[in-house]
Image (spheres, helix red, strand yellow):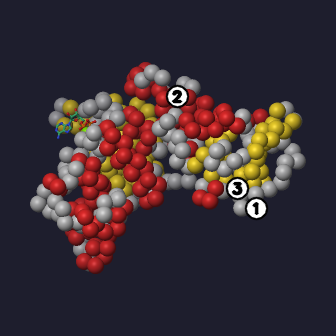
Amino acid sequence: MQSHHNHPVLTDTHSFLTVKNIAVNYGEIAALQDVTLSIPANRVTVLIGPSGCGKSTTLRCLNGLVKIDGGSITYEDEGIQDLSETDLRRSMGYAIQSVGLMPHLSVEENVDLVPRLLGWPKASRTERVEKLLKLVRLEPEIYSKKYPHELSGGEAQRIGFARALGADPPMLLMDEPFGAVDPLNREQLQDEFIRIQRQLKKTVVFVTHDLDEAIRLADYLVIMKDGKIVQADAPERILASPRGEFVERFLGPDRALQRLTLFTADRLMEKVLSGVEEKPALAPDESSNRTYWQVDAEGKPIAGYAWVGDKAIRRLIVNGTHTVQQYSSLKECVSKILNLGLPSAAVVCEEGRLCGEVRFETIQQISQG
Ligand SMILES: Nc1ncnc2c1ncn2[C@@H]1O[C@H](COP(=O)(O)OP(=O)(O)O)[C@@H](O)[C@H]1O
Ligand SMILES: [Mg+2]
């Protein structure tokens, strides 16, 4: 379960919550058995598995709604049992599909619920609600005074998300939040979620039974079956090496290439070899599968070099045409790589500066398996 520590996306973070050997029984039913998990801080952990496998129960254990019958849950050095209910609510926002918005409260009152409970002063609450509505792209002037029955399904989900963020909790627990939304709106909500999460970097635990959704959103994917964890790792690593028949079947056939559309470049982005010099004096150690990027004074890529033996091949780079952005899909990376004939795709950030590369070799590791 510790393997995530040497993954590019999951390094540079610590464990926010540590779950050790927990068990939950409902009478004769063992809902969870020996579940061990460490939730990486500032990342999205997705729990997935067939209905009844224990996803919701796991989530409810994390915020103390369900008492565990064995094992321990440690939250930043304190056991969950030792935290008061208000502490728990403050540290964890909670958005669930079925527990919707309060029908008798307006949008702003719904979003304001937890800050008010925590006794925030009125002025900062008003400001907070406005900020959150803007964050989920619902104009406060239009939406503040509306009631839940006046909202579309997608709008209601956004308000639910804003409410979960209400008191700015470090952690968000989301139980199939987009479950009741039609596929088109669902994809839009996922886009919004990704955009907001990249900005806020919350520690999120997200439950879904939709595999595409899981792969799109997860930094850390946890596959459950019959109250146990069968595999937990970065999704690309699970796709590359599923553990056992159950996971393989769960992922389905031709999983890899199809799913390249779901991964963004920044997940696999690596540091580049680059410089303003026209041509590097020496080929780098792993010359055969690396690119040397020549950049201008502003750090924008001008050319890429690949090595064939000790001979360097130069390709001119046109920003945009030959480069990808952080949130471009891996499919787009592949098409740029094939188009240019270099071993990797250049990733550019704001103002077109080179900020990393995605290597073909790394993409290949995902698509095989
Ligand atoms: N309050 C409860 N009382 C009795 N059994 C429950 C209760 N909640 C969940 N269970 C059982 O525990 C198991 C796990 O349920 P749950 O965590 O809700 O699964 P999932 O969210 O993965 O669909 C199931 O067998 C379910 O029937
Ligand atoms: Mg559930």
Locate residue 43, reporting x and y percent: 45, 51
Residue 108: image quadrant is: bottom left
Residue shown at 39% from the left, 51% from the top:
192
Left or right position of 7 against 298: left
Residue shown at 87% from the left, 36% from the top:
311
Residue 36: image quadrant is: top left
Residue shown at 61% from the left, 35% from the top:
335
Could you say whether the residue bearing mark 1 is in a helix, strand or loop?
Answer: loop
Q: Can you tell which mark lies on residue 297?
A: 1
Position of residue 198 relative to residue 133, above or below, is above
CA gap, disc 3 to disc 1? 7 Å
Q: Can you tell which mark lies on residue 52?
A: none
CA gap, disc 2 to disc 3? 30 Å
Please state which of residues 83 and 45 is positioned toward the viewer in this rendering: 45
**Viewer can see residue 203:** yes
Category of crowding for the residue at label 1, using alpha-carbon neighbours closer than 10 angstroms: few (below 14), some (14–19), many (at least 20): few
Q: Which residue is mark 2?
A: 257
User: Looking at the image, in which quadrant does ligand 2 appear?
Assistant: top left
Residue shown at 78% from the left, 38% from the top:
306
List the single residue furthest toward the left: 104
The amino acid type, in three-letter code, at marker 1 is Ala
Q: Nearer the viewer, mark 1 or mark 2?
A: 1
Q: Which residue is mark 3?
A: 300
Could you say whether the residue bearing mark 2 is in a helix, strand or loop?
Answer: helix
CA gap, disc 1 to disc 2? 37 Å
The amino acid type, in three-letter code, at marker 2 is Leu
